[in-house]
Image: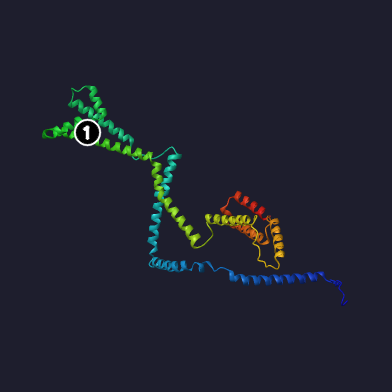
Amino acid sequence: PEGSSGPLICDIVISDLQLMAAEVTEILNSMEQYLRLQRKRRLDKLKPPSRLIRNWYIAAFTMPVIGYVGYRLFRGNAYVPLMHEVYQKVTSFWLEHVSEPLQSIYRELFTRRGREDVTDRNARLNAIAVLQRMLKSWLEEIHPDMPESEKTEKSLKMDMTLVEAAKEFSVRNILEINNIYRLSLIEMQFIKKEMLTALYAMDEMMGTNEINIKLAAMTPAFILASTCRYMMRKVVYAILKIGKSKEETFASFRHILLDIERLLVMRDNAPPPPRPLFTTGNNTNVRMGSNRHNAAQQSNDQILSSDDLGMLMLLVHECRVILWQDRRRFTRSELRNASEDLAELAG
């Protein structure tokens, strides 16, 4: 009744529950559609421009260059010899600096064949034996009075002193041309033996340093691969802004954790706020209010305010977003430990 202060009681009778549920569902759907449209209309203003517009300076520089180069290459089929030359260079570089060194290192470390010798070891031994026999026969004919032991020693040591002296003497007399021929053949055999010995020493040195030489041959390939990887990372991460590198991901996660730590440290036993200005008329009342505020502040030192708690939740959410979007940057144990710590921190 009018003028009464009691509660107003209205009796509502629902005759068709399914019809009311359908109407409520329709109203909720229309509200959701309206909110979706409003959200899209407002968020479109905050949506960042496309990647091409953000990197317009790169497109403005590279597109004309690419167009001009493509025109010059495809005009008159000039790209065919160029592609053939590039293919030959890449194949040669791959064989010389990657494939052959790896095969050589594998043969030396994991097979019994080892390195193939450049020189013929049997040819060197045969040249030494022939030279010794030639010296022995010459000494027996020219110096028959020499002791047998000395002849054997000079032939085994391949001492050419007597041969050089005899040739120097025979050159003065044209009648000893046959002896000069013989001495020259002995010297030629000695030179052959020295050349085979030098090649044998070089072969031994190459065999000893085979792995070092092959690793040195692979150094340009490693340098080129590292340079290409560095340039691609710069183009993808720094210029085109496609994703983040591992270092950038860890830096972002570390900065967020630092913000969480700073928030918790600053709110743990924070200093009391300054006293408000007061007048002489309400001096006592203001002091009492300030004392009560300080007591309440000291009692709530270990409790975060609503603003600080909301900021903490936002920081925890950012950490979880990084863990989810860049989970391939973390190991399974790191993901599990970080997720458990964030869950405990969020309560």
Q: Looking at the image, is 339 positioned above or below residue 29?
A: above
User: Residue 118 in the image: x percent, y percent?
Assistant: 34, 40
Q: Which residue is mark 1?
A: 186
Indicate the secondary structure of the residue bearing disc 1.
Answer: helix
Q: Relative to 20, does residue 218 appear above or below in the rendering?
A: above
Q: Position of residue 134 (x, y in %)?
A: 23, 30
Dividing the picture into quadrants, the one containing residue 145 is: top left
Is residue 72 toward the left or the right of residue 47 in the image?
Answer: left
Q: What amino acid is at disc 1?
A: Ile
Q: Is residue 119 visible?
A: no
Q: Residue furthest right?
A: 1
- The x, y position of residue 233, in whole percent, is 48, 57
Task: Please give the name of the residue rendered at 23% of the width and 22% of the height, measured from the top-left corner.
Answer: 148
* Any part of residue 330 in sight: yes
Q: Is residue 87 left or right of residue 245?
A: left
Residue at 54% x, 55% y is: 251
- Quarter holding the C terminus is bottom right
Of residue 189 and residue 156, the one placed in the foreground of this image is: 156
Residue 16 falls left or right of residue 93: right
* In this rendering, position of residue 209 left or right of residue 310: left
**Corner quadrant of residue 109:** top left
